[in-house]
Image (cartoon, grey):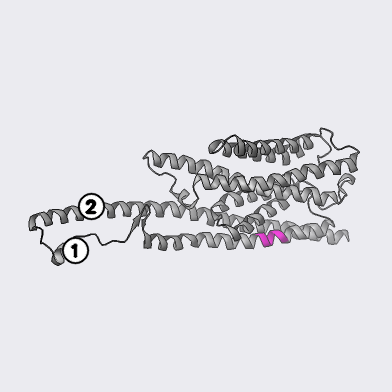
Amino acid sequence: MPAINETLGQYSELFMLLAAGTYTVAFIAFAWDLAKSSKTFHAVDLKAAANSTSEKVAVAAGRVGAALSGPDAGGPAGRAERPTSGPTYAGGTAAGDMRYTAERRVPARVAVALTVLGVLIHGAGVVTRALGAGRVPWGNMYEFLTTGAFVAVAVFLLTLIRRDLRFLGTFVLGLAIIMLVAASVSFWTPVGHLVPALQSYWLIIHVSIAVLSSALFTLTFAMSVLQLLQSYRQKNLAAGRKDNLAFMRVVPNALSLENLSYRINAIAFIGWTFTLMFGAIWAEKAWGRFWGWDPKEVWTFVIWVVYAGYLHARATRGWTGTRAAWLSIVGYACVIINFTLVNTVFNGLHSYSGL
């Protein structure tokens, strides 16, 4: 039996490696989509500006010709001087935008397909790790990082069913790749049994909700970063400056990003509240007290306070725009600290990294 468990563990590591490679290719495809959009939008802008100048010249020439020929002038020559192009918008003609949109989404569609393939391979790695360990696969930092990356990517793909959030692909996959690399390089732990305190059904309840909430916080972190970039871009455009972030045209405006981030943060906050509550109940069953000021408990509460402050400030105090985005980013920074430094540096009852 130990030999079988070890073999399953080796298969799991192979699946994780293949998933990381697939995610990397998908990450490149998402980045290519953004870079291609930037160049194409710039070319569309130049063409639109040239067409606008030509139309103005044609209209001016028509007026001059009408003035010289008199009010009864007409015929083919006069009609030819009138602009004949279709309706134009900020990015060019309507037909041109439709053709461009269909072309631009090709790299994004390829990236999504690769991400689906990657998450299936990743899921196989998580399952084989669980079978090899004979338990849920989040008993140490290696397992938590690999499972957390899987859930983050899976949640991203599920959201694509309802909303076109492919612009988040570069950020989400980038974080997932970092988590997988960190798990393999710094936190690798062989398949083994859990310490007695973790041998409880509360591990499934408490940690699964924490992982799901963290995955949602990952999405809102990416949205907050994009919100800051979009806000900066919109201010530059309003001031008449050059658009140096043309790829951000594929991203919704700052207000839309903020509203969506707020709604997802509200859902994730509810999950984190249950994480805190169930953790306290588990602590009472494992150690005989609900709260003991353990570093992990303290940071879990700090995260709850930061996101509670974010939701309250935005809903009642008018903390919108960049202030709300920065507060969301601070909350995610606390999440990162909680799942890295607290597990590996601070001594406490929750130090289960396996190092």
Give the residue displayed 32% in from the left and 54% down from the top: 48
Q: Residues within 10 Å of mark 2 (few under 14, many from 20)?
A: some
In this orientation, does residue 354 appear?
no
- What residue is at 60 percent from the left and 38 percent from the top? 314
Magenta region, main secondary structure:
helix
Q: Is residue 121 above or below residue 269?
A: below
Q: Nearer the viewer, residue 42 or 262?
A: 262
Q: Position of residue 95 (x, y in %)?
A: 37, 63
Under mark 2, the amino acid is Lys
Residue named by callout 1: 80
The magenta stretch spans residue 121: yes
Figure label count: 2
Element class at badge 1: helix
Q: Which residues are magenta?
A: 119-123
Of all residues, the one furthest to the top in this rendering is 293
Q: Which residue is mark 2?
A: 56
Q: Is-magenta flag for residue 17? A: no
Residue 62: numbered disc:
none
